[in-house]
Amino acid sequence: MMDIALIISFALIGTALGCITGLVPGFHANNVAIILLSLYGSISAFLLSISFIKGEMISILVGIIIISTSIAHTFVNIIPSTFIGAPEEDTALLLLPAHSLLLEGRGYEAISLSAAGSYGAVMMAFILLIPFRFLIGPPGDFYWLVDRIVPWILLAVSAVLILTERSKMHVLYAVAVFLLSGIFGMEIMGMDSSSPFGMNISLLFPALAGLFGMPTLLHSLNVPSLPEQGLGEKEVDFVEGWKDVATGTIAGALVSLLPGVTSAVATIMAMVARRKKDRENVIVTLSAVNTATSFFVLAVLFMVEKARSGSAIVLDEIMDVERWSNAVPPYSLCYLLMAVVITSLVSYYATKFFGKIIAVHISHIPYGMIAKASVTFIFVMVTLFTGVTGVIVLATGTLIGLLCLELGIRRSLCMGALILPIMVTYFL
């Protein structure tokens, strides 16, 4: 019973941290994992001084905080994307349908749909976990095949994105923007940021804020005010809803196997596979992708002993990761999966709670003021986290994003900033 109580307690600590990182643009769950790694010695000494905590449980308990933070983050990070237009790598494409619903007075509906997609992804991931284990590991051993076909998958996805534009001229525009975004992405991959306050993070934050967030906000400056935000929750068709969740979960599972491929790329794959155009379906699908990726990154760490995210790298550092070679998962993974269940349930309600609070008050503020404040906020965060280099990256990304709007092509083509560098790495 004591072990169960500890798992619940530490899962709640991680959930609280994930809510904080999810609500603060630019502050990622990986940052918490790195901080915990640097403090691991002190944390271990403190926990050892508590008589009822066994020594072998310490790394698992810290691991629970890390995975709970990561899962909770994927639930809550829809909120700043929707209300202030500040996307992360995981929510860049979610921003577009969610923000458009906000302008119709349906911001809370977007939040609740996202929470449902993330929670559904956890349920679907548990259903697929055992088949996934036998497919990727023995006797299936398909891991080697997936690793070899990834560049061709990305090439096919890119081709579909480009060739499905509405005219030949728009296809040419799409090629140009995709390549421009890709070159932009390759340039920032080799650049170092320099925060004046020592808070360096990836330049992907200003890049994606520029490509997706700033153009949306700049086009919203003349919106006089937001309509009253409804607090209703749209019922999603059961069959269609689970198709959206399944598509997102499978895409998340696939990219969790691939080095250098993130959930942002999985969102593109899911959008191509699930051709539903409704904004509601897109939100559910892409939210499922983000949460499923975090779930399966944990599973893959134990299945093939490969760390595919910052949080997984830290877990591998602090825990004795036992390879999952039988039907039953290792006991340490079982503890972590128990924490995932707790975190998902709490995060689902926390996301809706925070989303409802903001939705109630946001329509009372002139939206032009909100848009200006959001632009200022993003600029300040970029400056604090990435310095002058980040500001230049933000401005460049904004120009590319505005170019998409002027040319009338999908801004999802700007994901070339992530896809093209990965393709070049694999092919060259």
Image: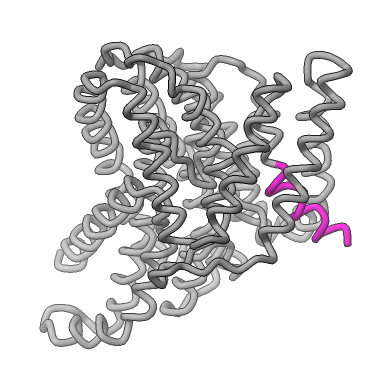
Which residue sits at x=36%, y=73%?
A: 35
Quarter of the view holding residue 189: bottom right
| Range of residues picked out in magenta | 416-428
Q: Quadrant of the N terminus?
A: bottom left
Q: Can residue 427 be found in the magenta stretch?
A: yes
Q: Is residue 252 above or below residue 222?
A: below
Quarter of the view holding residue 59: bottom left
Position of 339 with respect to 173 (left or right) is left
Q: Is residue 381 above or below residue 323?
A: above
Q: Is residue 114 above or below residue 142?
A: above
- Residue closer to the observer: 38 or 269: 38
Which residue sits furthest left? 51
Residue 80 drawn at (x, y percent): 37, 38
Position of 54 with respect to 298 (left or right) is left
Which residue sits at x=63%, y=30%?
A: 402
Residue 15 drawn at (x, y percent): 27, 53
- Magenta stretch, main secondary structure, is helix
